[in-house]
Amino acid sequence: MIVKGGGKRAEPETSDRYSFNWTGKRDAIRLVSVPTEATLKPRRDASLHFDSTPNLFIEGDNLEVLKLLYKPYFGKIKVVYIDPPYNTGNDFVYPDNYAKPLDAYLQLSGQLDTEGNLQTSNPETSGRYHSSWLSMMYPRLFLARQLLTEDGIIFVSIDDHEVYNLRLLMNEVFGEENCLQQLVWQRYASGSNDAKHFALNHEYILAYAKERAVTGRFRYPLAEKERATYTQKDEHYATRGPYKTDAFTRGRPDHPSPGLRYEIECPDGSFVFNEWNRLESRFLQMKKENRIVFRKSQKGKWLVEYKRYLNESSGRVPRGLLTDVEKNSHGRAQLRELLNADGIFTNPKPVGLLKHLLQFSTNSDSVVLDFFAGSCTTAEAVLELNHEDSGTRQFIMVQLPERTPEKSAARKAGFQTIAEIGKERIRHVCQNFNGDIGFRVFELTESNYRTEAEIIAEDAQKYIAQLENAIDALCDGWRVEDVLYEIALKEGYPLDSTLEEVAGLQTNTVFRIVVPDGMQTFHVCLDEELAETDIERLRLSKDSVFICRDIALTDTLAANLALQCRLKTI
């Protein structure tokens, strides 16, 4: 517009607002809703105690896997820990495009060249250096949040390259109010003197809650040296155990609280005024219960302390500065000792670091997910914790079968992919414990179902034949167990469900799929024809789910089954 009294054009008003944006963000958001065309195929040959374990190792692109896990594991994961690519210019970045079977997907998205070689860099010279990394991370974090329980936690390891962008991204996906802490982990005992400015000896771990308001208190068990400080005894020793004393004064001068300021009468009748860590009413109650101790300092001043009993301790509050947990060198040594090979994986996280995080964030029966599993330190940490406290925690590891470099230590040791390193590590850890501890292996593969395009194409080629026979919805060469697990996923059943063949049938083979707690079940028959006598033996009710192939049904049988149960066809 033209301003009166002058010839200058006024700048239009804008509604500026704070936002976090990057090139490709819209496409990254769209990727979340693009359906996957893949499935997960069981690999008994690569598993250990397949039929008796709830633990999972899934080989394939983690975005596609997360989409497949969405329905069966929605709201069931207590803790997610990931150690994603740090985007240093040399590590792996996943430039997603479309949901395709693995090799086609990797080639289409630029991860494989035309000769099948893996592309492993995201050079800083790329104009979309940070944007590509953020677009890779966004859909994975979005789906991970959906899998968490309401009181679930996610931990993400990162270094200086992307920590600021990652925190903004986590704020957008999880909400800034759900940021619990930016942990600082001392990665090296000392820094390198080769650095030009500062010797970096630390990394970060971002901790976010799904819903901070319902997240419980974090505590982890006292160390043996901490338990040893409880040495004193009183009349409550039998029930409360030994105790130690701590100062009753409140050590928060930066946040004064007038309500905690009052006088306390000492044994000689004198008074001490200070800011204490309990209200006066609570102090009087503790004094009545003989929980208050008075003693004089070397200077003759009265000190007020309170008793802390060992049996009443809920554990130690975790710190944001991790200097007393295992370092990077421990991770390399642990993997070298376990697999009897050195240098096969770059900078594996130490088991002690993961155990520290899981000790205060999981329950004894929690499910733990790591979808950048690498050498599977997280799996080892879960198994060790279970061994120590008799827990039943379950792990789900997801790792892309990224090829190890030619002439590398991993290749010389016989590992063709990073996924093979992870599986072998889990096998060794399981074998170190007694019992039938194991893990089920699944791999991302093409669906057993024909796509609509395939059916249409076949319809055009075999139109006359189709007038007499319906097209089978299953692809050529399908295997029964593969189809059963794909059906289970589509029905929202977890991958540790049990497949049972129904006994007592004469003609048909019918399977019962049961979730681990036994509260849900359904029946599947993949035969080309159904015998009414066998269907009657199943004793299906109106609440029963029965799934069969469409080609196996006659009109009459379909109508009868629809009246008996909840009929679904493939």
Image (cartoon, rainbow, N blue to C red):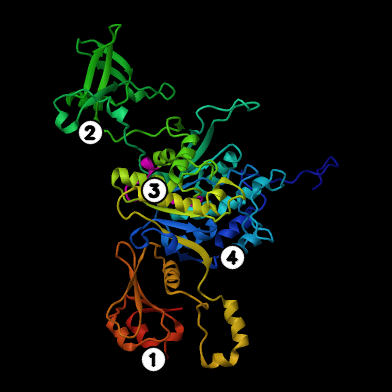
Asked if the stretch drawn in magenta spans residue 367, the answer is yes
Comes first in the chain, label 2 or label 4: 4
- Tell me if residue 272 can be seen: yes
Say which amino acid is labelled 1: Thr
Q: CA distance from mark 4 to mark 3?
A: 33 Å
Q: CA distance from mark 1 to mark 4?
A: 39 Å
Say which amino acid is labelled 2: Asn
Badge nearest the viewer, 1 or 3: 3
* Tag shown at residue 311: 2
- In magenta, the rendered stretch is 358-372
Mark 4, residue position: 100
Mark 3, residues whose alpha carbon is within 10 Å: few (<14), some, or many (≥20)?
Answer: some
Residue 24 position (above or below residue 518) = above
Q: Are marks 4 and 3 in contact (CB under 8 Å)?
A: no
Residue 337 position (above or below residue 456) = above
Q: Are marks 2 and 1 in contact (CB under 8 Å)?
A: no
Residue 292 placement (x, y as % from top left): 22, 22
Mark 3, residue position: 429
**Which element type, helix, strand or loop, lies under badge 1?**
helix
Mark 1, residues whose alpha carbon is within 10 Å: few (<14), some, or many (≥20)?
Answer: few
Q: What's the residue at 50%, 28% (across, down)?
A: 189
Mark 1, residue position: 556
Q: What's the residue at 72%, 47% (across, down)?
A: 127
